[in-house]
Image (cartoon, grey):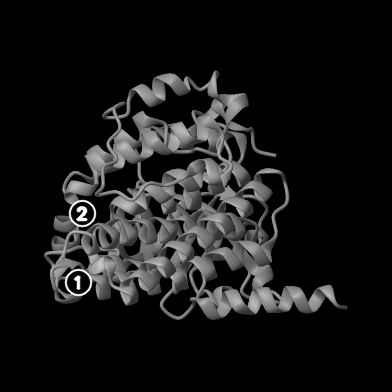
Amino acid sequence: MAASMTSWSGLLRLGKLLARSPSRLPIRTCSYYPISDVMYGLTSEQQELREAAFNFAQKELAPHAQAIDKNNHFPEFRDFWKKLGDMGFMGITVPVEYGGLGAGYLEHCLVEEELSRAAGGIALSYGAHSNLCINQIYRNGSEEQKRKYLPKLISGEHVGALAMSEAGSGSDVASMKLSARKDGDHYILNGTKFWITNGPIADVLFVYARTNPSAAKPQHGISAFIIEKNTPGFSIGQQLDKLGMRGSPTSELVFEDCRIPAKNLVGELNKGMYVLMSGLDYERLVLAAGPVGIMQASCDIAFEYVHTRKQFGKPIGSFQLLQGKIADMYTTLNACRSYLYSTARAVDQGHVLSKDCAGVILFCAEKATQVALDAIQCLGGNGYINDYPTGRLLRDAKLYEIGAGTSEIRRLIIGRTINEEYK
């Protein structure tokens, strides 16, 4: 069970963490639609954590969001990463002894949400680093691996990534072809990975490969490894030009007789699928905070716009059809956030329910796409030009219906789980 904010706030110098926030003065104005944290049952410490994340993201990230999207590049990425580390936002779910905050998944979701509100692509990279890489090493790595890799990942000095998917192996992950052959006290990897978030810049990669090609079931022949970027035989292949989530570097990874120490095996040999599947629920939960942040940003923009834009002599938000639209946006956002926080609390209490971890990202992702479309409609012609951020929000939102398992796979998981409950 993860520690509560109350239990770790003293040990982790929460006051010092909050003092690092770019401003302790209220930043929220009419340009940011307020969040009623009391309604969601957040503790005072959790509310302060959100405020720190909001202040930080709006100062350090939001001003760059448009340029990041346009150029598909964030020149200050490394500096920003270290600032995230200084704020204590990396490794939120990792115990203090390894440099983390020792907090829960709800706290992780709060930070992910506020970063996504500021710039979806960088928030996606943060989730891949802090949850997919750091959390997997903490949950499954040996003591030596934790001591070696976690400190620099948590400080932000290093960037992490997880490499699971391949060009021919997405939803059918067990069909992966990247091979790892034992050779003395090393493994030799050959093959490729694809669609890897943070791939081009990662210092540490959590990689899945096939170690037993003759296993009776393909899922029983996969193992997990930690690979460092400068390992001979490892290189970056094609860098991907994505529709959205631009500035979150994504690429192919190439392994050509890539030789790694056998001690870099994570967990048991040929049991990598257990490592993988055990992390997917946490991945889906934390990444579900991404679309919630995008929905909040959509409401921030649209609600302000419809109350300042005038037609026929009055704000367009006073017309009933737009009142209905912003009401739908508001209630959709609140329903998604409530589901997210409830699921996170359950996980923090030791109740990891696959159908709800799949359900919350399914629900939030599809609703985020719709809310972003609604925001475009609220802005009319301005919503369709790139001088306004609504188009970026729509393109960013769509990723969450595809990444971390498609909507179709999520529905399959939920449906099968409910079927099993009746057997």
Identify the residue under disc 1: 383
Let me know if residue 231 appears in the view.
no
Total of numbered circles in the picture?
2
Identify the residue at image location x=34%, y=37%: 84
Mark toward the viewer: 1 or 2: 1
Q: Is residue 219 above or below residue 120?
A: below
Among the 4 quarters of the image, the one containing residue 58: top left
- Check disc 1 and give the amino acid type: Gly
Q: Quadrant of the N terminus?
A: top right
- Residue beneath the point at 39% across and 72% down: 324
Q: Nearer the viewer, residue 237 or 307?
A: 307
- Helix or strand or loop: what does disc 2 sit on? helix
Q: Is residue 149 left or right of residue 419?
A: left
Which element is circle 1 on? helix
Question: Where residue 296 sits in the image (x, y, percent)?
Answer: 37, 56
Q: Amino acid at mark 2?
A: Ala
| Label 1 or label 2, whichever comes before in sequence order | 2
Mark 2 lies on residue: 65
The answer for how far apart the CA atoms under marks 1 and 2 are is: 16 Å
In percent of width and height, residue 178 lies at 48, 70
